[in-house]
Amino acid sequence: MAYEALYTRGRPKTLSQLIGQEHISNALARAISGGRTSHAYLLVGTRGTGKTSTARLLSKAMNCDRVHEAQKSGRPLDKKEIPCNKCDSCKNFDSSPDNVEFDAASNRSVEDVTRLLSTAYLAPLRARVKTFIIDEVHMLSFEAVNSILKLIEEPPPNVAFFLATTEINKVPMTIRSRCQVLNFRLIPQQTIAPYLLTLARRLNVTLHEDAAKKIARLAEGSMRDALTYLDQCYAMADKEITLADVNETLGLISDENLDEIISAVKAKDRAAVSRAVTGAFRSGLAANSIAESLITRLRDIEFEMLSRDEKNFAELDKIIDALRKSTGEMYGSGIPDIILEMTLMKLAAPVQNFIAPPIAQNVSANTNLDVGQKIFYDVINYSGEKTMSLKSLADKAVVTNFADDTLTLCFKSDAVAAVFKDTHQNNFEQLAAQVAGREIKISVVIDKNLPPPFLNNMPEPERSNLVNAMKTFQATDAAKIK
């Protein structure tokens, strides 16, 4: 007998086995137990979340002998016995001519649908209810949709329709309004991983917990994808599936390699970054896959830090933001490897390369001011996108002095200066200490006659040249004349 894939073996046999969709299984169990099933259902959700499996369970339950006996006697039904899978109707369900499954993706014309539904007006041959399961209904042509609209609006007796789709926005409202809509959710990783461990035990295979979590994450909410990944690892493994087996079989980068890259970046060691990235490329992985894996690993590290009540995420957030931007640049680029390498190299640039040199005691006032302005603009650039409010406030400040590691910022408005002192000064001083490599204090002063920041924040001799040009041309806007 041919090998049966896990995603077919793992299909639910009753409503109680419908994993991750309890809101649907509970509602359907109550409807079936009370004999209140509809003639048309629209099952909506992403791939692998159980739409077709649920349609088959409903179809089988509508014809189940024991379900009908319980409905007649008024006995409430449990999800474990819907359907029973023991009566003749359940056993012959797959071969029954009264159960029709139709793939609208490959049979989307009006002729295909008309031929399929031509038997809808005929009485069922064996079953109580003739059922039509139409998968990917949004792929039907406009004419084909109209051909089934009348049937759903005024259905023949003993006929039920189950329409499954992954894109409800493409299903006409005329169809949606005539169906009961069942919305299938993405299945959480915390639900998929335990199910994989249980299934592995049935297969007499030892599945490591970290390997199950890795597969669950890769599935992205799809149980079918998770079972396919597990099936692939099961075929390659020998009675045991470890995290290393999952990485090797599915062509993934290991957490050790990712941690090596992250550690090298945090250590500002470009040589180590080069070695680690080269090792990742040797595994045959694409640059965007490595970048996405790094982002996921950094996210896991931050959650681990949260569990330890650590809150210093500034450096990790900076790495994530840079990698996120680089992934956008990689798509459509002919040099994705170089983009990733340069992104990591910039992140690993030693801080001292961007630190202003120590100020000598005999430097001039202009040199001191230039050094202070460099620190000021380094802070603005280092603050990045996450502190736009700080950047907008600092744009209204003018560096008027820098002496004894104290940076004097002058504001023209009392209100802006007050907001800066109350809300942003501490953060600004912390960032200044990081870019300067030593403690920097901020002194805030107010000058109602403050010239434009654009002019005052310029280094010499550009400042003097621009002032002379403004006098010559009798200009008042320094930015325009520059």
Image (cartoon, helix red, strand yellow):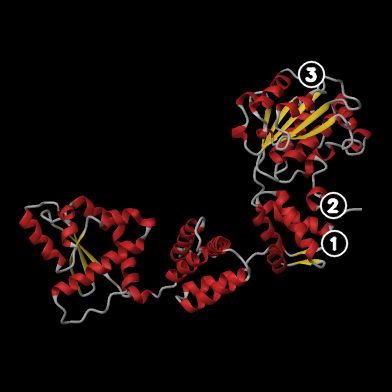
- Which comes before the other along the chain, label 3 or label 1? 3
Amino acid at pointer 1 = Asn
Q: Which mark is residue 156?
A: 3
**Does dot 3 land on a helix, a strand or a loop?**
loop
Which residue matches tag 1?
204
> 144 left or right of 323?
right
Q: Residue at x 15, y 69 (%)?
A: 460
| Label 3 vs label 1, nearer the camera | 3
> 202 left or right of 299?
right
Quarter of the image with the C terminus in it: bottom left
Which residue matches tag 2?
4
Alpha carbon distance from label 2 to label 3 = 37 Å
**Residue 347 percent across, percent down from the top left:** 44, 69
Quarter holding residue 32? top right
| Residue 465 to residue 74: above or below | below
| Residue 32 to residue 300: above or below | above
Name the residue at the right extreme.
88
Q: Residues within 10 Å of mark 1 (few under 14, many from 20)?
A: few
